[in-house]
Image: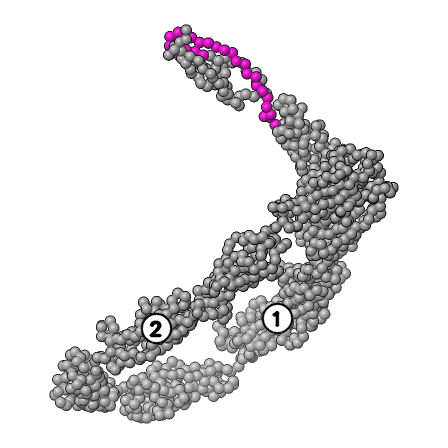
């Protein structure tokens, strides 16, 4: 009986394999259909477990005495291709000799696979080898053995490449399954086939005379490209040549050393040169068999050293000179000699080492001792007094630094005394004398001293340097006051006395100049002078005196009490006198004004009405404080001034202005004028421009009213301005106090347009698609122009035209409105499919005009209007097919082209049926055009097949087609291939020529097969099998013509080698062949020479060339060379050099008389030749330009 409820519910689970499998569902009631699912697929590995046994348990869920049942399950694990081939090594490394032959086993690689069957090791295939020389090797697909397929070439040259890295690929499943790779390293073993090569083409060294070692270690080095560590690369050095026995060379290291010091004077050579050269040769040879060697020149420069010191012809020199000798006076000449044989070691310069004390100098070249410029030899002026100088003079040779040698000698110079000293006045103190002092009164005694023993001193007053001043410190004219006449000076004693009565009010102070002279001078006039002051003391004897004969003041009407009107002032020539002031006249004056008795200040005492009193006139009295007192009078006039009570008024013009918008900031555009009836500051006008109305674009001069442009104007932003101008009086003093009056004026400024905006052009973006059958004069697209300038002027009027891209006049513009034009077809576009870019130009009519350009792209799409055209083979060609040709073999590839593009130009092929059924014997591939043999041939049954091939395009809606008739001739087996009668053939192409301009025809071949009279001769095809890896050349297989596919550059490569192969099997191009076989007559070596054109300008090797000459250089010496290079060839690379422009001279001495060009540049060599005879004392720098031309006129310049 079937249980229900909880008694019928059970759960299921996997026993012994619960980690691998699970059940779904795992719980059910009464009955259930369940699924066993893989829980962990990674644990099911066929290579580890091929069979699994486990149990499924079903158990009731009741808690008491549950019943259960079990069933065993067996699972067979099926293999799948989940393992990759594993090579037996992580990488393979082998060694192969340089001269290995074809067939030599290079390596054996092996891969294992853990899978079974074809997925495993038995199904492993070696499918590819890749790397630098993979094309030279053959990989056996089953065994993994790698052998040499091609020998020779740089790849097998160890010196070029000693190691090759390749990758070998293995796949399981018979080459179609999982892939793995391993690295193969091929090492090329060495042979002795390289000469040692020195790292330098020439070695040079310097050796100082008497030295045992070179200045720097002299080491030659050669390298041998053969394998390091072998006899083939082991190098030994030998030394040959002039005086080589004086040197040793280490045979291993190449270090060269002198055996003993070398005496420079014992080596032959010109005396003026301080370096003499030994010419030697160094040989480097290896220890290979046979031994190979190389040689290099070695030049050793022996340099003279300074080993002889100078010596003077006397051991002591002396001379005398007067103490007043001038700078530059020659005193004595010393002379020294040096026995060294070369310059500068034997060149002597002289120097005063000590004792000169800046008094003497010596000419460094002649040894002449002279008085130093500015030197004073007077013994009395030296501290301590010195009349004898002992000079230590050195003679130094031309040695450098520590190598410089010298000699010393003493020169004594005695200074002879001369009476040449001026007398000296002793200090004179300032004096004072009362006015009215009696004549003859002694006031001082003048004293002087003179170191000369025979001096006779005379004193005198200097009228020219005598001054007199009044009490206001004003200098009195010498012609009016002969101040010397007021004093007497005794010539011999120097006693100074009063010579004339003095008035202090006339002269307050004297400045007297005294001269003392020595009448016994031996050197002309000897004098000294001094100046001192004589102050005149006062006596009271003068009345006061007003500073003006009368006084005139002004005061504002209604002024407040105490306002200062003016100040009167009187002076008294006497000193220290006090003056008092008072008003005399009407009492009314005292009521209106008040006078300060001490200061003389006149102030307002009460309000003054200008309408009542335009002037106030009165007298002021000045009284001094003397006893008795003295006085004087003066008139005073006071003007009463008006107040500000009138407004400014503007002139009515200008009312409006018209200016150009591009007027420069700062330019004057008008002058604004206003007037004011008031006077003074009240009538002075200040102009102000309202910034809101002017927008900061204009400015006005506040004083003159000149109106100017302040900032740049732009009519397109604003075409006119209404300016508000204000005129204020008393602005400086009264504006802030609200005491100014003003007026306003409106001025309209209109801007005239100038052409300052470039037109804008809006065109359709992207490519505008039309067909090649677009009708003539039909619109294609619309172009719209705009210009921000004034449209009512030429500046804002725009013309649109086509400026570029319409070279074939296929398109034109048609104006449809003032601002818009249509692009239309002007002529038929038939066959003109492609993309065209027209440059439209929008140009305004301004002067000067402005323009902008935009590109419009027009895509003319192809229309299927061209049928396919057969390229090869030619029409009515005969194909010779051997009778034993296998079914499926390719006979020929048929090629047709279609001038249309896209699907319209896509060509397909098919065989057309014929009544005789010839087409059934062949199959034609529809895409590639390869004609293949479908049925076996039997020449006895049928020798000739006539077939017709149709080439059709995929054009829509109607495809176009063409037919090609071919004859297939079944021939006997061909015994001989076509043969060239020569091994090499030379052709020439001109560089930079476009493809198709030059076409070269290769020579014909001969065929040794007997001609079958019943059949036509077999066509011969030519193919390039080597040398054209970059596809620079195209060889027509049937026409046997060669042309370039791109322009050639001779400077990049001037020679190409092509290997051409002839064959009658035109349908199967031969494989690549790496070497020319002289025994293979089907091969032709074609040498392609590139003919040069003058397409490169010469270039100087430097932008700046430097050189130098000394004064010892002779006229005509070629002392330097400028050099240029031209990558062209032959006549195109012939260069000529010229000096151009003026030779600039700087920092020169002694070259002012140079009248000719200093240098000549040799036209052919570029050598620079000295064109003047240098002299001693000449020095300076020369700067000039040189130009180099080739025969075509191309040139370059450089600076020398």
Is residue 159 found left or right of 621 in the rendered image?
right
Secondary structure under tag 1 reads strand
The front one of 540 and 1029 is: 1029
Tell me residue 1157's x, y (percent).
67, 73
Q: CA distance from mark 2 to mark 1?
A: 62 Å
In front of the other: 247 or 501: 247
Q: Nearer the viewer, residue 1186 or 567?
A: 1186
Instruction: Mark yes or no: residue 142 visible.
Output: yes
Q: Which residue does the image show at 66% across and 66% down from the upper left? A: 1187
Say few, some or many: other residues with alpha carbon within 10 Å of mark 2 (under 14 / 14 to 19 / 20 or more).
some
Q: Splitting the image into 4 quarters, where does residue 1198 fall?
A: bottom right
Magenta region, residue range? 58-84
User: Which residue does the numbered mark 1 point to in the structure image?
Assistant: 1144
Residue 72 lies in magenta, yes or no? yes
- Residue marked by disc 2: 748
Mark 2 or mark 1: which is in front?
2
């Amino acid at each position: 009986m079937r249980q229900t409820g909880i008694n019928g519910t059970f759960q299921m689970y996997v026993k012994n394999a619960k980690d691998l499998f699970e059940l779904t569902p795992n719980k059910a009631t009464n009955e259930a259909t369940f699924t066993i699912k893989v829980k962990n697929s990674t644990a099911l590995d066929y290579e580890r477990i091929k069979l699994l046994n486990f149990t499924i348990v079903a158990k009731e869920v009741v808690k008491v005495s549950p019943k259960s049942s079990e069933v065993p399950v067996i699972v067979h694990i099926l293999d799948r291709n989940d393992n990759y081939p594993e090579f037996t090594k992580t990488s393979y490394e082998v060694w192969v000799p340089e001269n290995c032959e074809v067939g030599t086993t290079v390596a054996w690689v092996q891969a294992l696979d853990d899978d079974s069957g074809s997925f495993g090791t038995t199904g492993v295939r070696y499918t590819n080898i890749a790397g630098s020389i993979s094309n030279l090797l053959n990989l056996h697909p089953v065994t993994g053995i790698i052998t040499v397929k091609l020998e020779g070439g740089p790849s097998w040259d160890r010196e070029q490449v000693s190691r090759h890295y390749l990758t070998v690929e293995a796949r399981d499943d018979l080459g179609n399954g999982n892939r793995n790779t391993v690295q193969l390293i091929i090492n090329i073993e060495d042979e002795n086939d390289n000469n040692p090569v020195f790292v330098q083409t020439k070695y040079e060294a310097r050796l100082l005379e008497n030295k045992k070692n070179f200045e720097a270690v002299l080491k030659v080095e050669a390298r041998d490209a053969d394998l390091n560590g072998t006899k083939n690369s082991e190098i030994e050095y030998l030394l040959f040549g002039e005086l080589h026995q004086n040197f040793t060379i280490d045979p291993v290291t190449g270090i060269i050393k002198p055996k003993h010091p070398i005496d420079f004077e014992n080596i032959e050579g010109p005396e003026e040169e301080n370096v003499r050269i030994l010419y030697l040769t160094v040989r480097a040879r290896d220890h290979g068999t046979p031994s190979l060697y190389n040689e290099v020149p070695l030049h050793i420069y022996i340099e003279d050293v300074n080993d002889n010191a100078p010596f003077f012809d006397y051991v002591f020199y002396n001379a005398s000179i007067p103490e007043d000798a001038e700078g530059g006076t020659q005193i004595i000449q010393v002379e020294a000699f040096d026995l060294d044989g070369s310059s500068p070691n034997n060149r002597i310069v002289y120097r005063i080492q000590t004792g000169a004390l800046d008094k003497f100098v010596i000419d460094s070249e002649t040894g002449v001792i002279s008085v130093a410029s500015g030197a004073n030899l007077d013994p009395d002026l030296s501290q301590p007094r010195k009349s004898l100088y002992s000079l230590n003079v050195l003679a130094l040779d031309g040695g450098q630094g520590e190598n410089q040698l010298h000699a010393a000698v003493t020169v004594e110079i005695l200074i002879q005394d001369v009476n040449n000293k001026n007398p000296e006045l002793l200090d004179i103190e300032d004096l004072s004398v009362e006015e009215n002092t009696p004549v003859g009164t002694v006031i001082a005694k003048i004293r002087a001293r003179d170191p000369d023993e025979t001096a006779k001193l005379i004193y005198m007053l200097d009228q020219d340097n005598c001054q007199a001043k009044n009490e206001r410190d004003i200098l009195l004219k010498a012609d009016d006051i002969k101040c010397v006449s007021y004093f007497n000076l005794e010539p011999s004693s120097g006693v100074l006395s009063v010579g004339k009565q003095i008035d202090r009010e006339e002269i307050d102070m004297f400045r007297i100049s005294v001269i003392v002279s020595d009448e016994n001078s031996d050197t002309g006039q000897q004098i000294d002078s001094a100046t001192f002051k004589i102050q005149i003391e006062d006596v009271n004897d003068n009345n006061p005196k007003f500073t003006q004969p009368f006084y005139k003041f002004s005061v504002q009407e209604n002024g407040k009490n105490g306002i200062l009107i003016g100040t009167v002032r009187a002076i008294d020539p006497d000193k220290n006198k006090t003056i008092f002031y008072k008003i005399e006249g009407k009492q009314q004056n005292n009521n209106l004004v008040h006078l300060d008795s001490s200061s003389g200040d006149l102030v307002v005492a009460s309000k003054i009405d200008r309408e009542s009193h335009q002037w106030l006139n009165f007298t002021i009295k000045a009284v001094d404080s003397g006893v008795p007192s003295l006085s004087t009078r003066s008139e005073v006039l006071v003007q009463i001034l008006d107040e500000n009570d009138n407004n400014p008024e503007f002139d009515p013009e200008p009312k409006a202005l018209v200016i150009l918008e591009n007027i420069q900031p700062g330019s004057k555009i008008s002058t604004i004028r206003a007037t004011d009836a008031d006077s003074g500051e009240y009538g002075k006008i200040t102009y102000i421009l309202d910034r809101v109305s002017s927008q900061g674009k204009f400015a006005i001069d506040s004083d003159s009213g000149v109106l100017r442009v302040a900032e740049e104007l732009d009519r397109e932003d604003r075409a006119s301005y209404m300016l508000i101008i204000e005129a204020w009086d008393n602005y400086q003093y009264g504006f802030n106090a609200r005491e100014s009056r003003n007026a306003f004026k409106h001025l309209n400024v209109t801007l005239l347009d100038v052409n300052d905006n470039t037109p804008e052009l809006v065109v359709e973006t992207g490519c505008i698609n039309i067909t090649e059958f677009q009708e003539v004069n039909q619109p294609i697209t619309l172009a719209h122009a705009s210009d921000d300038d004034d449209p009512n002027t030429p500046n804002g009027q725009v013309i649109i035209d086509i400026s570029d891209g319409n070279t074939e006049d296929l398109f034109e513009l048609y104006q449809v409105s003032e601002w818009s034009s249509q692009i239309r077809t002007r002529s038929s576009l038939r066959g003109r499919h492609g993309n065209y870019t027209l440059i439209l130009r929008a140009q305004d009519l301004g002067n000067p005009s402005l323009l902008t350009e935009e590109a419009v792209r027009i895509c003319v799409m192809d229309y299927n209007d061209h049928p396919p055209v057969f390229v090869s083979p030619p029409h009515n060609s005969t194909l010779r097919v051997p009778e034993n040709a296998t079914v499926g073999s390719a006979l020929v590839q048929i090629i047709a082209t279609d001038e249309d593009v896209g699907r319209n130009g896509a060509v397909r092929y098919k065989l057309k049926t014929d009544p005789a059924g010839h087409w059934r014997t062949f199959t034609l591939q529809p895409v590639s055009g390869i004609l293949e043999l479908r049925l076996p041939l039997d020449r006895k049954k049928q020798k000739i097949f006539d077939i017709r091939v149709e080439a059709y395009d995929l054009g829509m809606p109607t495809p176009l087609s063409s037919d090609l008739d071919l004859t297939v001739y079944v021939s006997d087996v061909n015994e001989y291939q076509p043969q060239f009668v020569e091994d090499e053939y030379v052709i020439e192409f001109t560089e930079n020529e476009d493809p198709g301009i030059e076409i070269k025809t290769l020579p014909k071949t001969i065929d040794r097969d007997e001609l079958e009279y019943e059949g036509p001769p077999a066509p011969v095809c030519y193919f390039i099998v080597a040398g054209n890896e970059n596809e620079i050349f195209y060889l027509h297989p049937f026409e046997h013509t060669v042309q370039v596919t791109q322009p050639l550059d001779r400077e990049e490569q001037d020679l190409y080698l092509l290997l051409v192969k002839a064959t009658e099997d035109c349908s199967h191009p031969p494989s690549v062949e790496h070497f020319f076989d002289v025994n293979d007559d089907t091969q032709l070596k074609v040498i392609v020479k590139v003919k040069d054109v003058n397409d490169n300008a010469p270039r100087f090797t430097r932008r700046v060339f430097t050189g130098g000459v000394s004064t010892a250089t002779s006229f005509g010496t070629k002392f330097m060379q400028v050099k240029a290079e031209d990558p062209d060839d032959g006549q195109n690379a012939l260069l000529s050099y010229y000096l151009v422009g003026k030779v600039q001279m700087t920092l020169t001495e002694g070259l002012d008389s140079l009248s000719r060009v200093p240098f000549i540049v040799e036209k052919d060599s570029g050598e620079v030749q000295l064109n003047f005879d240098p002299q001693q004392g000449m020095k300076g720098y020369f700067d000039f330009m040189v130009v180099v031309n080739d025969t075509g006129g191309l040139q370059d310049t450089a600076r020398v």
